[in-house]
Amino acid sequence: MPNFFYQFNFYLFGLIAIASAIAFVTRKSPVAAALWLVNTMFCLAALYVMLDAQFIGVIQVLVYAGAIMVVFLFVVMLLNLGQPTEIADIRGKWGKLAAAFLGLALLAQVAALAGKRLPEPFIPGTGYNAETVRDLGAVGSVAQPLFNEYLLAFELTSILLLVAILGAVVIGRRRRIDAR
Amino acid sequence: MLAESLALSAVLFSIGAIGVLTRRNAIVIFMCVELMLNAVNLTFVALSKVYGVAGQVFVVFVMTVAAAEAAVGLAIIIAIFRHKQTVNLENINLLKG
């Protein structure tokens, strides 16, 4: 049973994550929005560590907060979008209504599912065991299935990244190269 | 802490979906999609504590796909900005015919 300190930190980081996400959605300036999203990701990284996924927590900070968000901020800087005046804010009345309806519907689904029990095949069995982590370490316990059962998917990921890099370069280059 | 994690993930996903629907800036919409992917990652990690470590492997894959998506999507946004001088979705209707 988790102790009080664990639970307190869990709720603390969860509430900070929700507050940052709300601030992220409501900020007009994209730079402020991006920084609030980074804050959300840091809180999620802390939660990953508390959920015994230390390696995922580290690459959450390195890849998401460190790499992907920097790309977003670079694009904001490249396109010179920092001024909130030229950035349109929330859509009209109907957009707000639709968004509120969708949010309430999603939350109602969550509330409805909260009362249900898991079907029999999904009842957790042995699954996660602390011995694996103790034997292989936090990285090894992820690497073990990644390079055995999911090796094909892992290799296909490299092709995906290659295609993404080529696509980004081809789409992002200037047209003058064609005209020449 | 499984129930709390799943609830937090659902709330974050809802906030991301609301952001996608209400914002008009294409870059912010992309960031909202990233937030939704993060919420799904939290579900994977929380369930990996119960069902085995394979959920964390899927998180690694989701992060890779998110990185690829960000690279290509932002390149598309830059190309559209060169064409239209805006990232406001109200003014981008290239596929409208």
Image (tube, coloured by chain):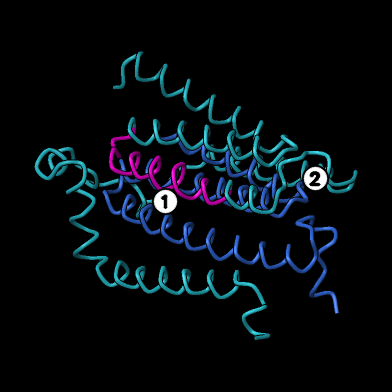
Task: Determine crowd level at label 2: few under 14, some 14-19, many 20+ residues with C-alpha closer than 10 A.
Answer: some
Q: Is A120 situated above or below B78?
A: above
Magenta segment boundaries in residue numbering: A51-72
Badge 1 element: loop
Relative to the observer, which residue lies in front, A53 or A57? A57
- The chain under label 1 reads A
Whether callout 1 and callout 2 share a subunit is answered: yes
Q: Mark 2 or mark 1, which is nearer the start of the sequence? A: 2
Q: Amino acid at mark 1?
A: Pro
Q: Which chain is blue?
A: B
- The chain under label 2 reads A
Describe residue A117's horizontal placement relative to residue B28 as left or right.
Answer: left
Quadrant of the image occupied by residue A33:
top right
Quadrant of the image occupied by residue B93:
bottom right
Q: Which residue is mark 1?
A: A119
Task: Determine crowd level at label 1: few under 14, some 14-19, many 20+ residues with C-alpha closer than 10 A.
Answer: few
For the C terminus of chain A, the quadrant is bottom right
Residue at coordinates 22% horizontally, 65% vertically from top-left? A149
Q: Amino acid at mark 2?
A: Ile
Describe residue A103's horizontal placement relative to residue A74 as left or right.
Answer: right
Q: Which residue is mark 2?
A: A87
Badge 2 element: loop
Relative to the observer, which residue lies in front, A113 or B87? B87
Q: Colour of chain A?
A: cyan
Residue A24 in picture, x, y percent from top left: 65, 36
Q: Examine the structure image and report whether residue B72 is included in the region drawn in magenta.
A: no
| Separation of marks 1 and 2 at Cα, in angstroms | 47 Å
Residue at coordinates 12% horizontally, 40% vertically from top-left? A131
User: Looking at the image, which residue sits at the far right?
Assistant: A93
Describe residue A9's horizontal placement relative to residue A79 as left or right.
Answer: left
Residue A48 in picture, x, y percent from top left: 37, 36
For the N terminus of chain A, the quadrant is top left
